[in-house]
Image: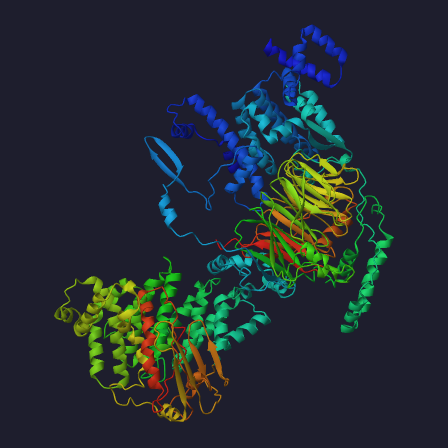
Amino acid sequence: MSDSELAYGSSLTVDSIKVIAESVGIANLGDDAAKELADDVSFRLKIIVQDAMKFMHHAKRQKLSITDIDNGLKIKNMECQYGFIQPDSLPFRFASGGGRELHFVEEKEIDLSEILSTPPPKIPLDVSVRAHWLSVDGVQPAVPENPPPLSKEAQKLESVDPITKLSKPSNKDSAGKPVCGKAARLKASESVHVKQLATHELSVEQQLYYKEITEACVGSDEARRAEALQSLACDPGLHEMLPRMCTFISEGVKVNVVQNNLALLIYLMRMVKALLDNQSLYLEKYLHELIPSVSTCIVSRQLCLRPEMDNHWALRDFAARLMAQICKTFNTSTNNLQTRVTRLFAKALQCPSQTNNETGNGPSMVTTMKESEKTPLASLYGAVQGLAELGPEVVKVFILPRVRWLGERVEGALSGIGGADRLAAGNLKHQLLKVLAPVVRQLRQPPDVPDDYKRDYGYLGPSLQQMVIKLRTTPAAGGGGGAVAVVSCTPPLVPHAPPAPSPSPSPAPSSAPSKVAESVARNVVISAPSTPPPQKFVIVSQQKTPQAQVSSSGHIVHTSQPTIVRSQNVQSVVVTSGPPGGAGAGGGGAGGGAPPQKLVVVGVPPQGSASAALPSLSQAPVSVMAKPVFVRAGQPSQPPPELDDLSHLA
Amino acid sequence: MAEKSTPLLAVLQLLRKYNLKGTEEILRKEASLGDVEYETLNLPEVEIASILTAHHTESDPYSYEFAYESLKKFIESSLDVYKYELSTLLYPVFVHMYLLLIIYDHNEHAAKFLEKFGPEQEDYYQDDLAKLCIVKHKDQIKFNELAQIYSTNKFEVQLSRDVSSQLKRFLQEQKSSTVIINIINNHIQIDVHDGPGRNQAQVRATAGGLLGEATRNENRAKVYYGLLKEPEIEVFPVPAEDEEEAEETPDKPKKKKAKKENMYMKKPKSDPNAPPIDRIPLPELKETDKIEKVKALRAKRVPLGPDCLPSICFYTLLNSGHSAICADICDDSTLLAVGFSNSIIKVWTLTPVRLRGMKSADKLQDIDKEAGDVLVRMMEERDRDTCRTLYGHSGPVYKVGFDLFKTMLLSCSEDSTIRLWSLHVWTCLVVYRGHTWPVWDVKWSPHGHYFASCGHDRSARLWATDSYQSLRLFTGHFSDVDCVQFHPNSNYIATGSSDRTVRMWDCLTGSQVRVMSGHKSTVFTLAFSVCGRWLVSGGTVGDILVWDISNGSLTAALPPSHTGPIHALAFSRNGTILSSGSLDCTIKLWDFTQITEETVNDETGSTTSVPKDEKYLLRSFATKNSPIKSLHFTRRNLLLGVGTYEGSS
């Protein structure tokens, strides 16, 4: 009602008329004349707009456009306004001064020569028709072409205020669900068992889907997994099974961290990634399950059976990136997510004497932490990586002050004995250098004196200084992959190196891997080895006896799969054969059961993730460095590295 | 003299209008009006009315407010039985008081009057008031469409006999001011009906027309709403195909036979409401058309109902922005035509069959005309287009429509023309000129040959494809005629208009047979039920009304679940499901059987029952930001929708 009241009186003001008069050269328009004009002009404008509305309606639009006004003028036998075709609505600007207030449209001067010199704009795409099923026998399929059954806002509302769901009379409007049958029954029970309503009921199809997806995600078939992850990342109708998915992930992480089953942890993290990527899901209310799982995968002391050779570093990197993504997406002033996550990582770096029970929210970690007074190097690595993903500012505040202590730890480990520790220390060192160098470069002025560095940063000082100098000498970071990257990104790859001659002569691997290694014939084919960015590897491996293994701890059982060739746009090709070993962990590495065999191919996506500069830099050289690794890995004497398809992690 | 002579001239004109020669003579003599003024007797109706009223009312601005208040008080204090009918008087009285105030130059008072009483008018009149309030000066009345309509036409109000006698008593008591009496005499048509006064819901159901309710007298004419007898077609011209099918599924012939019986048992008996088959001349069916018809009859139809909902296939137009305006799918669901705001029409094929043009003339000569497949042979084999574009219009194309046999396409446009296109040679065949302003809608007759159009010039027209000029001109709407629809028996057309009424016209006589008021907003789309008895109309604010055209009454107002203008309505082929598509990006399915059944049962009671429950709505489907432009049921009862994707914003 207030709107219409407003409309009754609206008209152009005398001031506007005067300003318009001035703009066309009439210096002093009388008040009466202006009033008269204002009334008349508003009357005519309103008539034109009314007619234009008709054209808008008949063009089946709900937004008035300039062509509607033109057509409205036309039916009044008036000349159209030429040259006002504008794709967007014109923003009004406001200015005041000299006691007058003005609304005006900003018109910029256009340089004709500039227009002439610029290449012509792209031709707009032609109109095309696309068909999809909006409804099949009265039920709307949850395909990407259809809107999500429950909008993100509704999911949010539901998570904030569960009462809304109860008070809603029926959901047939929003979801297009049959009122009859189950929903009706549910409705009938509403009044009595209020609590039941909070649970999501899954239809048989959804249960089937859940089973299929979870099996595929942690199963052995890489092609199926890709499909499943694709489905998780795109399908709009998943919100109903989201609680189960999240529980699946968190439980899976708990179990497999204890079992040290790297492969499954990677698969689970990839599921998290897919869920995060799904535009139609509102994950906030499940963060309490996801964040502990992800942070476990970052800082857990041990994630794999053989820390000396398995690439758990890649998992830590990947999970750290996930954590950064979660922080970026869900951080609000009320949940302070980023602060809490930062604090969590920072505590891990805190002080040698402190045990960091707080570090892992995941209960799985707590027990493992107690035995060692010191935070394990792997956890330190994870914490550093986790902080690094949160941005350079975080690095400056939380890592840089502790670099001296970290250096001591690294120094101690490198000089000590124990291959695993040395390897971890090496990794940590590389990681620290990589993370710190850009920050230090910004902080310090050019004369980089090694002694200053030594003084300020302790053990790591000299290496850091070299790194900074290297950074300074190379063109600005925008220059791309080049030399910087080669140096800076070795760390993630080092895990591949264990089979290669490492400082410690024999890191006392468990007997099983080497046994298997002898019996395995493998071919490593590297195609197009010399062209750096888009590289492909084809790796074929075979295993002697495919065997199914039943895990005692109750995670999913994999059966052997035929050889699968997968080709993705991620530009990696993996050929695997033999029983994938995800379940092998159950049997433990020491026993006679052949340890799982897996191959990892690191593919190079054409573009790095744009999120952080460092990770994106690191990608190009990965393949460069990977080459020798695989060549070496091909030597029969070396135990096969437990590998995974890490291409998605890149 | 000049000041004084204008009223005299008005009186003179009035006398002439009623052909009162004697009085006119005397008046002229007495007032000594020469013949010079005699020529200038062309005062507009508005002014005559205002001048004549002026002499009664003294044009005291304060009396209006007082009079309106007293009318309001009278209505409020009257019995509940009378209250709601009487309240329909308030709006017209209010409007005319405002206009009178403007006419007498009491502009400030008019504004105040509007501000004071405007907001308390019915909500569905607020849009009109917003338009009316633009008028702030008496010179502006003649430029304002709405003010013009109000001052030149009478507002219809329906009152029961008791109520009207109450009103008369009240008016007689009003000695002090004659304002209301004058307004009621001059501008309001009171239609007295027998029977009890109506309650609020009943009044509200039919109120809302630009000029009040439709009177019952106007809906007395008999309408033959039954379906025509289907012409006898040889049902077995393609026995080969029949056998094939029979082999495939042995139980089918029985079923088909039953269905055929169904069709041919019912039709020859022909319901008593059907018009005679030769009431209007219908085109002879060509051999090819017959084959097509048989195909249509044979299609295996899914028996839809509330328990068996249709599947919906949705065609999304990508990259069209806001340029795609209208769409149509041909009867056998193989072609899709879309009209664009940049004057072009595009036709897509929805099946693997490509769009082919006809061969050139000299190549056509080589074809053996006796060959059985001559129709196939004359098409160019090399054409393999999936989309063809038709150029010709010079303004936005507001409607496209395939004829029954998908050989021709009709389109209408802002350039005030209607064009007929051939889908064999892919060019324009005829340009029909006649409308003077943009043509909003054009529809084929269900039997072909005829088509109807309507437009901004407030008229609807009936055309035949073989004539350049329109056969019938239907005038009577007070504002734009926004949509038109043929009755399934081709004898009537229905029109919906911005004056918020739906009217039905007889194609034979050209006369108006039904006026139906009740919409609260512009009517944008119409659909006749398959049985021919019901008419469904959809409006700007998402309102859908169902009318019984046997008596012109409102059958049901569907619960307001659409939030945007409705631009598409379609009945399933068996008439049980009504689908509606709106710019709010949803398609809704309604249980039409229940809607009609319930009201037929109710018929003994009040004629206009407005059900409030939501049980009519079967299901609602949202699209992904794609407003629905068109809906179409295939012969097998699959629902096809067409919409444009408008980006993720």
Q: Quadrant of residue B433?
A: top right
Depicted B193 relative to depicted B607: above or below: above
Which quarter shows the C terminus of chain A? bottom left
Residue at x 76% of width, y 13% of height: B21
Lateral position of residue B131 relative to residue A533, left or right? right
At 52% from the left edge and 30% from the top edge, which residue is drawn? Answer: A44
Q: Is residue B631 left or right of residue A637?
A: right
Q: Nearer the viewer, residue B149 or A194?
A: B149
Q: Position of residue A97 (x, y in %)?
A: 32, 33
Q: Nearer the viewer, residue B465 or B74?
A: B465
User: Toward which corner of the image does residue A585 lie, by quadrant?
Assistant: bottom left
Q: Total marks drawn?
A: 0
The residue drawn where x is 38% and y is 93% is: A518
> Which residue occupies 45% across, 92% down?
A544
Residue A634 image offset from top left, x and y in percent:
36, 87
Q: Please, is residue B129 above or below residue B466 in the view?
A: above
Residue B130 sits in which quadrant? top right
User: x and y percent of residue A270 in the render?
Assistant: 43, 72
Q: Is residue B613 above or below residue B381?
A: above
**Is residue B590 at all visible to an observer of this figure?**
no
Image coordinates for residue A21, horizontal then vertical, percent: 41, 27
